[in-house]
Image (cartoon, helix red, strand yellow):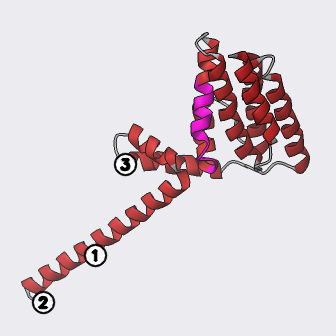
Amino acid sequence: MNTQLMLTLIIGAIIIVAAVWFAVRRRRTHELRHRFGPEYERTVRQSRTVTEGEARLEERQARVEGLHIRPLSAEDAQRFSQAWREVQTRFVDDPKGAIADADRLVGDVMHARGYPVGDFETRIADISVDHPNVVMHYRAARDIVHDNAEGRANTEDLRQCMVHFRALFTDLLGTTTTTAPQHRTELLVSERGRS
């Protein structure tokens, strides 16, 4: 074989390998973006590189695949739904207590589904795998819980906290009928009355 033909074959092979690598990487990015939604952008933005961010997301995915996440039984779903209605009703008279109860109830649902309920960052990472569209609600709710503990949350903040917890709770429960519309109306009307 002459040198020119050999060089052409080597360059062709490099181009093919590069094209395959690029296609695989592009597909990986697309799949992770699709799976993690807004959490993809947040994680990549907080990482040094896109590759590092994507590796972190893949680690989360592998961790959660090793857990025994399960849907709630009909009885548990009903029990948790009733508990949520009680927490939401309690908000009218005791907003601070209600958000603490909502936070605990979300943790109880996570535990019943099989999620470890250790530190908050681990919970967020685990939830982001199967519930990426509500992770931002969980973060926002926990920020308000923290602000409330520091005495920096007003009644509107607490109402927003309940809205955030409800979004997460509903998604974890696996149903869109967790709270009846009148409960949301009661929550909004009661807040207008307090203003």
For the residues labelled 2 and 1, the Cα–Cα distance comes to 21 Å
Would you say the residues marked 3 and 2 are in contact, meaning their CB atoms lie under 8 Å apart?
Answer: no
Task: Kindly state the secondary structure of the residue where label 1 is placed.
Answer: helix
Q: Can you identify the residue that label 2 sits on?
A: 1
Type of amino acid at the residue the image marks with label 3: Val
Q: Nearer the viewer, mark 1 or mark 3?
A: 3
Residue 96 within the magenta-colored segment of the rendering: no
Residue 166: x and y in percent read 71, 36
Residue drawn at the location 18% of the way across and 76% of the way down: 11
Horizontal side of 39 relative to 133 (left or right) equals left
For the residues labelled 1 and 3, the Cα–Cα distance comes to 23 Å
Quarter occupied by residue 123: top right
Residue 16, labelled with which disc?
1
Residue drawn at the location 23% of the way across and 73% of the way down: 15
The answer to whether residue 171 of the structure is visible from this angle is yes
Task: Kindly state the secondary structure of the residue where label 2 is placed.
Answer: loop
Type of amino acid at the residue the image marks with label 2: Met
Residue 170: x and y in percent read 74, 43
Front residue of this view, candidates 178 and 184: 184
Quarter occupied by residue 21: bottom left
| Mark 2: few/some/many CA within 10 Å (<14, 14-19, 20+) | few
Horizontal side of 147 relative to 44 (left or right) equals right
Horizontal side of 71 relative to 32 (left or right) equals right
Q: Nearer the viewer, mark 3 or mark 2?
A: 3
Chain part drawn in magenta: 130-143
Q: Is residue 106 above or below residue 151?
A: below
